Amino acid sequence: MSKRRGSSGFRRFFSDLRRTKVGIVGLSLLILFLGLAIFFPLIGNMNDIKNWNNLQYWRDNPKAAPPCWAVGNTFKSISVTGGEYTSNLIERNGELDGFKYISYSFLYNVETQPPIDVIARFNISYSKPTYVYITMERPDGKYISLTGNPESSERTSVFDLFGVDPNSYSGDIRIQLASYVNNMITIRNYIVPWLQSNNVTLRPQDVFRLTNVAFSILHQELTPNIINAQNVTYLSGKYNVTFVFYSNDKNLSVALEKAIVLGGCYGIVGTDNMGRDLWMGLMYGIRWALIIGFSVSIMSVLIGGIYGVVGGYFGGKTDEIMLRTAQVFYSIPVLPILILLAVIFRPSIWNVISMLIIFGWPSTALVTRSMALQIKEETYVEAAKAIGSSSSRILFRYILPQVFPYLFASIALSVPGAILTEASLSFLGLGDPSIVTWGRILNEAEVAGATINGYWWWVLPPGLMITIVGMTFILIGQALDLILNPKLRR
Amino acid sequence: MASLGRTIAVQVVSNLAALIIIVALISALLVFYSQTILQGVVVEMVQEFTRNLARNPALTPEQKAQLINLYQQALEVRFGLVGNPISKVYHMMINILTLNLGSSRNVYMGNSASISSQIIFALKNTVILFFTATLISIVIGLALGLYAARKPHGIIDSLLSFFAVLSASLPMWWVGMLMLLVFAFWNHWFPAQSMPVYFAIQQLSQAYHSGSITTLSYILEYIRTWLYYMALPLTTVVLVSIGGWAYIVRNVVIGKMAEDFVMTARAKGLSERKVLFGHVLRAASPPIVTTAALSLVSSLGGAIISETVFGWPGMGLLFWIAITNSEPMLIAGNVYVTVLLFIITIIILNILYVFLDPRIKTSGSQQVF
């Protein structure tokens, strides 16, 4: 009987909440965030989160790349996995002059901007000396050999490029073409001669500057002062990068695992300087924000609420002692002490949550105490006392239910503070290093100098998420306040 | 009057007790903190000593072991690692309470290693920044809140409410980062770090003393330099705190406007202006003054993270520097000064409250908290 009455009261409460505009906005945002937090494995990629600290996992992504929608003319990444049929990949194999050869050609189209890198990963197996030949064909029909050319019987061993045993090896090899091309040895041996053969002669001091731009110069129109040109014009059209592996070994096998022609942008909110997909971090951060917000606010408000009611109800010495204790906690500057505690003890997220609860309850206690002081003077409480109800019955049956609506509102209103404080700790690098939170992403942004490097996509979204989630709970709290204090409605 | 005196006395005593308990807590934490750090230092030094001893062939292993043992004991005595931790906490408490803080290992701010003078230096900077910012936002917020309260649910009121909700959930340090991004990185209007302000001021005063600029231009240039380095942190603090403050004023004033005495005042035919400023504002002043004073005082702790982001040499940054350099006494002094100022303000406020609201003169039931 009483249970049904309780649930209908709760339903009325929610229908009241729905009637206010603020409440609707708050509730729908909350449902959205809850949905995103619960269904993250469907929306996002759990492996990304599990491997957040595994930098090997992220090495194929562009580093500190802005989101694609924000940069108009940039190269859009092309990714090819082995065994897939696409027009971007040509695979050949055969025999020539007693060598078995296997080649992979990657084709990509440059419109205004060139890619920033070509990353390729192969699974290779051989038991006799094996060589590799890399060429690039440009839209103007010019060929560049980036390794020794087998036609001039000048061979480059796999050892030189991949650092694996040249005579016998079985396993993965990986190359980042841009860093190979921008290497001084490659520049001296292959880039400068090629430029010279195309009537571009560089002064010695300019050769050194090639270490930053050699890969991008491969995509430029050839002009005599290519390195000092004011406006860089890239040659648009189809490029073809070919990797040829050749060996005496008839059992040579090369299988493409993955190749990426890397553009300068990534995904919805870009990447950080480790190449991590910030979108995943942002979405997953909702989970921790809600966990932290809910557990801290519910626990501290409940503890504070009961504490205050008990003190207010019993009065006298008990009340005096409890009130003074709460005041001591209230005067403690929370953030400095939290920082100190986080430095002394290992900052696991559950430690942080418990500390936030320990310092979070007094403000609620001070309010519910004065509420209890008023309620206990009501006649129905006196009546209950007169018929001999126990103190705990009066507290939990008559006084606490009166305080509950207020507690609901203050649970909602204290969520943002909890999220903010945790974010502040994480921002100082004192958060739990094993989990992904918005504060931590912002900490890494600050450490990497994101503000002074202009990586706005790394700084803006996490703070925005903190703000929006915080706003959601404040809106709900305000709607509850309006329902509970009709005076404010006017 | 006797009961008034008693109310105040109880307030003062209980707040001082709170202060002592907080100091005890901080001391206990810091004693534990420095023990762990110094223990590590001792272990390192003993290892170093052992390596050096191993090169000496003249000693037998027993003699070496004895020497290492003696060395370790000497170090533990030197670093104060022996003895009763409770008495150490007690001594630290006494030192903190009497502001006998000693010196830090390095000079982090100002030009003296004395912890008290560094804290005074930082406090001065925090006051310059946060007092200005809080005062600006109190004045603007008061005006905004009063304006919104005159027409509840009007456009201004709705905008204000939204802004209040927004700024209550904004991390101040994040707004600071955005400010740096926009005004220091994209448009090079303001400096990215505020630390060099003292260097700039020093150069300015040198130029003044050498007589190359006039007094008037010196004063103008002095203010301009401060504003140039303060602009971004100041705007950030004002922007973030103004909304919530205006919202509090609005709510308090709306609450008071619904009361009977306002009806009476209107019935007497007073102008709306007189009602608002003469009657409503007087009744609403205790909570508004309380909130204003408390926000002024809590700003003295500095915003640890915002000051770190901007490199503003105030209390917050000093605390963070003390943490990163493991300076227990500097941490203690910093927190103590903040708490001390907070508690003194609360005592003053409680006394002030009695005069602002005559009803609590005798009962003593209503307090700031």
Image: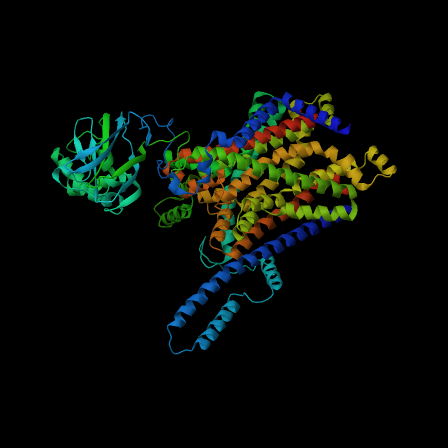
Q: Is residue A207 left or right of residue B10?
A: left
**Quadrant of residue A394 within the rendered picture:** top right
The residue located at (67%, 39%) in the rendering is A302
Q: Give the color scheme: rainbow, by chain, secondary structure or one colour.
A: rainbow
Decide if residue B354 is in sight here: no
Where residue B224 appears, x then y in whole percent? 42, 40
Front position in the image: A470 or A5:
A5
Where residue A423 appears, x then y in whole percent? 52, 40
**Is residue B67 shown above or below B181?**
below
Front position in the image: A385 or B187:
A385
Decide if residue A257 is in sight here: yes
**Is residue A145 shown above or below A430?**
above
**Is residue B186 shown above or below B50?**
above
Where residue A317 appears, x then y in whole percent? 77, 49
Q: Quadrant of the C terminus of chain A?
A: top right
Where residue B286 appears, x then y in whole percent? 67, 37
Query: Residue lying furthest front in this view?
Result: A250
Query: Residue lying furthest right in this view?
Result: A387
**Quadrant of residue B178 within the rendered picture:** top left
Q: Quadrant of the N terminus of chain A?
A: top right
